[in-house]
Amino acid sequence: MTASTEIAGLTPEWLTAALGRPVTAVTAEAVGTGQIGTVHRLRLTGDGVPRQLLAKLPAADPGVRAMLAGAYRQEVRFYTEIAATVAVRTPRCHHTEIHGDGGEFVLLLEDLAPARQGDQIGGCPVSHAHAAVTELAGLHAPRWCDDTLLDIEGFGRNGPEEAGTLRELYGPTTDIFLARLGDRLPAEDHETVRACGEVIADWLVARPERFGLVHGDYRLDNLLFDDADPPQVTAVDWQTVNLGLPARDLAYFITTGLDPEPRRAAEQDLVATYHRRLTELGVTGYTAEDCWQDYRFAALQGPLVAVFGAAYGIPSERGDAMFAAMIRRSCAAIRDLDSLTQQPAPLRPPATG
């Protein structure tokens, strides 16, 4: 069986072989905009097959496909080597296939409709945020400081080389970002974004004594919420998963997903909810105060992702509004939490166990 890079290749015959069950008919409809990949909802007819699946395929543009091959490989690795070892809820993966350098792949995933995608621009209720950070602990706790993660191809920890690259790129990227979206931001956010550049390289490699799996883009648009109370949360889009300080996911979610006023009122409780779930799942030697300080420190994840995403992503009105909202919220949090005054730990090689 060979992976198809186009939806036309997912014929009943191909799906029969992939699922191990006879598929007699299939219809497909596109889902989303397809900027970094294409997603289609498949409706299947057959004996013992799911009625609906989501098919993830590479981007149609060959140049984009080549550029994102590493991200495609990472998502396939997550579903094939990581998902079963953690306690975070993800779509069930029915089939994975990847070829060559990663530019050709197929993922057949559970369709969780009618669960709804979060809204990064609108934000979310605090109750939904508590559910999301509880679920996030299920990603971090089972492989907390697990050195065997370093044995998985494609997974590694940031070191001096990555820090040096970020030091060179952050300033010029900030210029691009502010030239495009600066008129949507107050002057104090311009200052905060630029101030992040003075410490961001050392920040990237600081606190090496704590590491684990990080989603890398754990935000509302990458979470699905059902109608339960509290809602069940399912994390999707695992193309940026890697290793790092776990609180980077936590701070990124809270500081980019909640407006300043509700965030200020709820963030200590949200961090406590996350920490409590970590301990329930077996993490020891990590105090509530450690978690709070990591959260404060890790708030720079918001500008890091948003500045690069807006500067080099494909422009769209919704994307521009989203990145501007993320920057406004995260910069306010960085100032509130005094994150920039926390000096990164001296650079030292990570422990290898």
Image (cartoon, grey):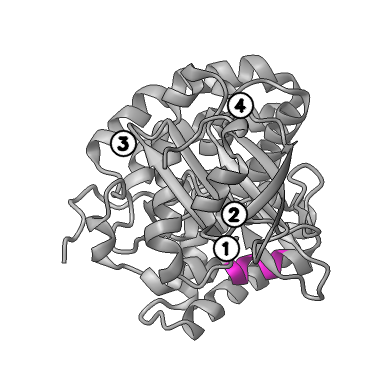
Report crowding for label 1: few under 14, some 14 to 19, many 20 or more residues within 10 A (C-alpha): some
For the residue pair 239 and 338, the one nearer the viewer reads as 239
In the rendered view, does 154 fall on the left or right side of 256?
Answer: left
Determine the image quadrant of residue 166: top left
- Report the residue marked by disc 1: 92
Marker count (numbered): 4
Say which element carries label 1: loop
- Residue indicated by mark 4: 310
The secondary element bearing badge 3 is classed as helix
Residue 88 in the image: state x and y as whole percent: 54, 68
Tell me if residue 229 comes above or below residue 330 in the rendering.
below
Amino acid marked by disc 4: Ala
Please give the range of residues in magenta.
129-135
Q: Does label 1 or label 4 sit earlier along the sequence?
A: 1
Read off the residue under disc 2: 109
Q: Nearer the viewer, residue 92 or 338?
A: 92
Q: Which residue is mark 3?
A: 163
Please tell me whether mark 1 or mark 4 is closer to you in this view: 1
